[in-house]
Amino acid sequence: MKHSIFAFLLLFSSTTIFAQNNNFIINANKIIGENTQFWKASGTDLLYYLAEKQSGQALLDRMDETKSCVYLRNHYTLTGHLREGVEVGIEVYSEDENGNAVYDFSRVNRIYGEFVKRGLKPVVECDYMPKGLTSREIDTSVGNDEGMSVKNSGPEDWDKWHALLVAFTKNLIETFGAEEVRTWYFEVWNEPDGWKQSDIQTFYKLYDVFVDAIISVDTKLKVGGPACYHEWFLKNFIEHVVNGTNHVTGKIGTRIDFISYHIYGLSGGWLNSEPVIKPQVQRFSQGVLWISRLLEKYESLKEVEFHLNEWGMSSNFQKTVAEYPDLHYRNSEESPLFLVKMVDCLYAIEDNYDFPTTMLLYWGGAWEAEKDSFFLGNRGLTTAGNIPKPIQTGYEMLALLGDKRIDVSGPRIGRRYGVLATKSSNEEVQLIVYNYNETDNDLSILDNIDIEISGLTKGNYLVEEYSLDRENNNTYREWERQGSPKTSKDADLKRLKEAADLSVTNSSEKKNEKGKFELNLKLPRHSMMLVKIKVQ
């Protein structure tokens, strides 16, 4: 008897382990809200540089083709700056020998033109202070412990700063048209948390002057900020825009159309240190809930949009997996799983706390592609050969959801299992089903997920499944199977491109005679599946 038990255990341990059953019920007739696609946004410190390079152009093209992004954000719109050894900013301001302003918006117009012709829209950061207007020769960020080192100061001449913002805004409307520019967002600065405490009132004045300048050109333009990452800074800033004295008008309060904030799963400064910190979606959920609690105290902010316009599993985009092995999640299927689980949680916050996220912007671009180096662990969307990383595949899966969210009941949102459910005007139903817990160690387990779908038209249905797991639709794992080549010259790009283009992993036909049917799915841990349910 002991031998037979041992043999059974040995056999069982050598095969895939099946774990608990998990049940979801979906009512396709019960619309719970719009699918606002708030996650269609991206940015990077290097965006202006990359937008004029083949690597960046390829990413912009893919965003357009897959409809996986709408908004793009970048720093250094108004001043030059060296980062990673390249010029990433735009110097738009200088003065002639008589001290008169000279503007040059040609490059920013050219770059924004690359966005607009692809249906993409800028978040226009009005930073940082141009060299010709900086009030201090040397004044770098103080207290910004995430690696930003910029000139945080007001202008030498406030009238010239105001005039620059007016001229810049007029130029954008003349170049792209008022109707287009009204769909953009104008943001005062980036991460002003690093301003010296003695200069905070100067920053508030900077915001007031910024708002006055932008809306003096067109009152329908959208203005906001502060793009900070500390709650204490946001609280004090909100108190100023609601109850403070406006430095331009002398009245109480300053207009704000959107409030922007940044959250990362952990600081890059904590990598390779004790204790180990694992990025978890609940950090983002808690951060957003704290902000909702802060803002609900201000009646005048009820209609103001909330933008989480920088996020990532770890800060410091340039750090690599060679130096920091924990960053493997920036290469693998874990990043798109983190994204999808966070989208599910943010929708739950919207539904349960009446606090919608209008924009969720991933801070990552095409730097690995520009360097033609595969899967360095940088926070990015593409890698060598312009191959999409799995997180870009995740965005492309999300882009295939329908425009109406439908009711899902099952395990509580924020745990291991989840389902995003939508439908389109043609009655097609789309699901993204995920199996992801951030602290998993044993990924050999295969879980059963049973889904009952009701509210369907009677008839025959085609069910198509698109898995993103360690075997399917995963460029990182395909790269590993090729022996982890260093550059695109050493890789089988054809196979990598095939892995990047979402393909059906299973299809079946379902006959629906009672207005409902069941799906019985098996998902490995750390995997997700897009399911399309089409009437035949």
Image (spheres, grey):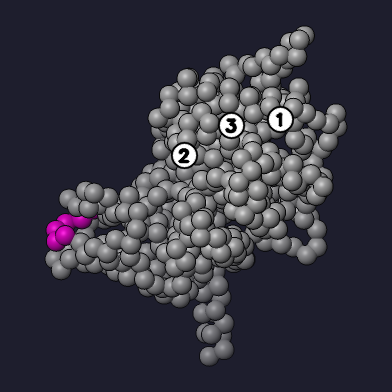
* Residue located at (49% from left, 51% from top): 304
Is residue 220 one of those drawn in magenta?
no
Q: Which residue lies furthest to the front in this view?
A: 250
Q: Closer to us: mark 2 or mark 3?
A: 3
| Mark 2 surroundings: few (<14), some (14-19) or many (≥20) residues within 10 A | many
**Residue 509 appears in the picture as rendered:** yes
User: Image point 61% across, 40% down: which residue?
Assistant: 249
Numbered badge on residue 100: none
CA–CA distance between discs 3 and 1?
11 Å
> Which quadrant would residue 373 be assigned to in this image?
top right
In the picture shown, does residue 3 fall above or below 336?
A: below
Which is nearer the N-term, disc 3 or disc 1?
A: 1
Q: Where is residue 251 in the image (x, y as percent from the top left)?
A: 60, 46
- 252 over 500 or under it: above or below: below
Q: Which residue is drawn at 58% across and 35% down?
A: 212
Segment tinted magenta in the rendering: 457-463
Callout 3 environment at 10 Å: few (<14), some (14 to 19), or many (20+)? many
In the image: residue 74, left or right of residue 500? right
Of all residues, the one furthest to the bottom in this rendering is 1
Say which quarter of the image contains residue 74: top right
In 3D space, how far apart are the residues under numbered discs 2 and 3 (Cα atoms)? 29 Å
Identify residue for label 1: 158
* Residue 128 to residue 427: above or below: above
Q: Is residue 460 magenta?
A: yes
Residue tagged 3: 213
Q: Identity of the amino acid at label 3?
A: Ala
Question: Element at badge 2?
Answer: loop
- Kindly indicate whether the residue at mark 3 contacts the one at mark 2 (C-beta within 8 angstroms): no
Q: Where is residue 443 in the image (x, y as percent from the top left)?
A: 56, 63
For the residue pair 420 and 440, the one nearer the viewer reads as 420
